[in-house]
Amino acid sequence: MILQRDGRLRPEIQEHGCYLMNLLWFANKFTNMQVEPSAMNDKMFTLFMRHNWMNEQAYILDPAGILNWCGVDCRYTNRHETPDRMCGEKEFEILYWKHPAVGGHFTAGDGRGRVTYDPWGVSKAASEGALISKRIFVRR
C-alpha cells in the first residue's frame, strides 16, 4: 500500500487523506483490491465525491459507502467509540489520534487499539500523541 504523502497523489489526499487511505488499506486487506495512485486521483476521487461519500478536501462523509463500493460488505456503527473499546469477531477499527503540535490523524487498528497501518508511515500523532477515539465497522 502506498503512503498518503506519496508525491503521485493529489494534494488533497496528501494533506487530508489519512482516513481515506485507511479505508483503502482495509479494502486491500479484505478483498485484495489493488489501489494505484492514478485510480485514486481520478476515478475514485471523483466517484466518492459524486456519491457524497467524501468532499473535495478528502474529508470522509460516508466511510461505509466507500468500503462497500470497494467490496467490503460492512456497516459503520456511526459512533466515535472510546479508546478502550475492543473489537468483536466481525469488527474492525480505524483509530483517531491527536498530537498538540501536529493535530489529528487516522490509522488502522488491530481491534485492540494498536496501529497496523499508518498512512503517513510513522506519524508523530500516532507515535507520540494520544488515542482519542475509534471508528468501528462491522463486517456482514
Image (tube, helix red, strand yellow):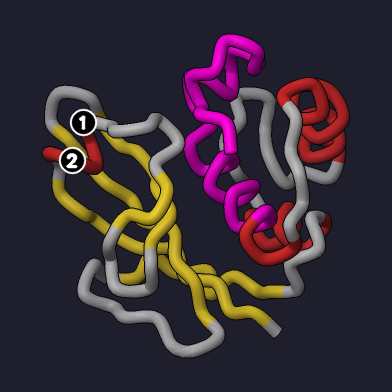
Q: Position of residue 53 (x, y in %)?
A: 72, 46
The answer to whether the residue labelled 1 contacts the one labelled 2, judged by CB atoms less than 8 Å apart, is yes
Report the disc number at residue 81: none
Image x and y of residue 39, in percent? 82, 28
Q: Residue at x 57, y 10 (%)?
A: 7
The answer to whether 76 is drawn above or below residue 36 in the figure is: below
Relative to 112, residue 11 above or below: above
Q: Is residue 27 magenta?
A: yes
Q: Position of residue 47 (x, y in %)?
A: 86, 37
For disc 2, the neighbor class at 10 Å (few under 14, some 14 to 19, many from 20) is few
Residue that mark 1 sits on: 124
Left or right for 11, reference 30:
left
Residue 95 lies, in percent from the top left, at: 36, 56
Nearest the viewer among 50 and 85 is 85
Q: Which mark is residue 127?
A: 2
Q: Is the magenta region chiefly helix, strand or loop?
A: helix
The amino acid at mark 2 is: Ser
Where on the picture, by quarter, is residue 69? bottom right
- In this rendering, the answer to whether 7 lies above or below 47 is above
Given residues 23 and 59, the one toward you in this image is 23
**Tag 1, which secondary structure?**
helix
Residue at position x 23%, y 36% in the image: 125
Q: Residue at x 45, y 36 (%)?
A: 119
